[in-house]
Amino acid sequence: MPEQVVLPWPTDGLLAGVDEAGRGPLAGPVVAAAVILDDLQPIAGLNDSKKLSARRREALFDEIRAKALCFCVAQASVEEIDRLNILQATMLAMQRAVQGLRLRPALVQVDGNRLPRLDVRAEAIVQGDALVPAISAASILAKVTRDRWCEEFAQRYPDYGFAAHKGYGTAAHLQALARYGATEQHRRSFAPVARVLAAQRQNG
């Protein structure tokens, strides 16, 4: 018989939900959040952040921060995205978010179908941001944090329209890229940015 493995963590207890924002955009960091909710302070209206209005997300952002047992928002930089690739950078941001929690969870539930490398029990849940309240809360913290970054960046580079497209590869964003070039926060490993930079080098 194989030797029984004794897990170094309890099999019941605190649940942390984890989600990210910003995998698809052409610029800026990818942001991840981990949240452990307080069962004694339920939060009404939690849902996938993409299904909520910006105003509702902002209100829930403050409520989650006030009522959660603990939370951590972390990110991976553009440099890390370009060096590691977006998937590995996202896993790194999630890992940082979990490691930054003040309390150690017994179980981590992550939105999607992949797991970061963690030293606690974890499971991936497809569409978890609509199914698990703690993941919904994490999606809201990550999305609002990332959107706020875009709005601040838009003030530094008003010609690119970041407040509107949030870094995604919209027609307006691609036109601005072609016209003004890439900023230091554009992801050079992403094909639309790489194409613009290559064209600029050719045109001298």
Image: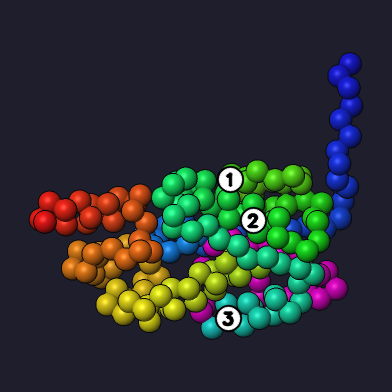
The answer to whether 196 appears left or right of 161 in the picture is left
- Name the amino acid type tagged 3: Glu
Q: Which mark is residue 113?
A: 1
Q: Position of residue 169 (x, y in %)?
A: 32, 62
For image coordinates 70% across by 76% down, the residue present is 65
Q: Residue at x 83, y 69 (%)?
A: 39
- Helix, strand or loop for disc 2: helix
Instruction: Let me know if residue 19 appears in the view.
Output: yes
Q: Which residue is mark 3?
A: 58
Would you say 58 lies left or right of 67 here?
A: left
Q: Is residue 107 above or below residue 155?
A: above
Which residue range is magenta in the image?
A: 31-54
**Cα–Cα gap, marks 3 and 2:** 23 Å
In the depicted structure, whether residue 148 falls above or below residue 21: below
Along the polypeptide, which appears first: circle 1 or circle 2?
2
129 displayed left or right of 186: right
Q: Where is residue 23 drawn, in percent x and y? A: 46, 56
**Label 1 crowd bin: few (<14), some (14–19), many (20+), radius 10 Å:** few
**Horizontal and vertical percent for residue 157?**
33, 76
Q: In the rendered image, which residue does mark 2 sit on?
A: 96
Q: Secondary structure at mark 3?
A: helix
Closer to the chain start, of discs 3 and 2, is 3
Q: Quadrant of residue 103?
A: bottom right
Kindly identify the residue that appears in the image at 67 percent across and 61 percent down.
34
The part of the image, by quadrant, that contains residue 58 is bottom right
Q: Is residue 196 left or right of residue 87?
A: left
Figure quadrant of the N terminus:
top right
**Amino acid type shown at disc 2:** Arg
Find numbered disc 1 in the image and state the secondary structure of the residue it sits on: loop
Quarter of the view holding residue 93: bottom right
Asked whether disc 1 touches disc 3, contact meaning CB atoms under 8 Å apart, the reply is no
Identify the residue shown where x is 65% and y is 59%: 97
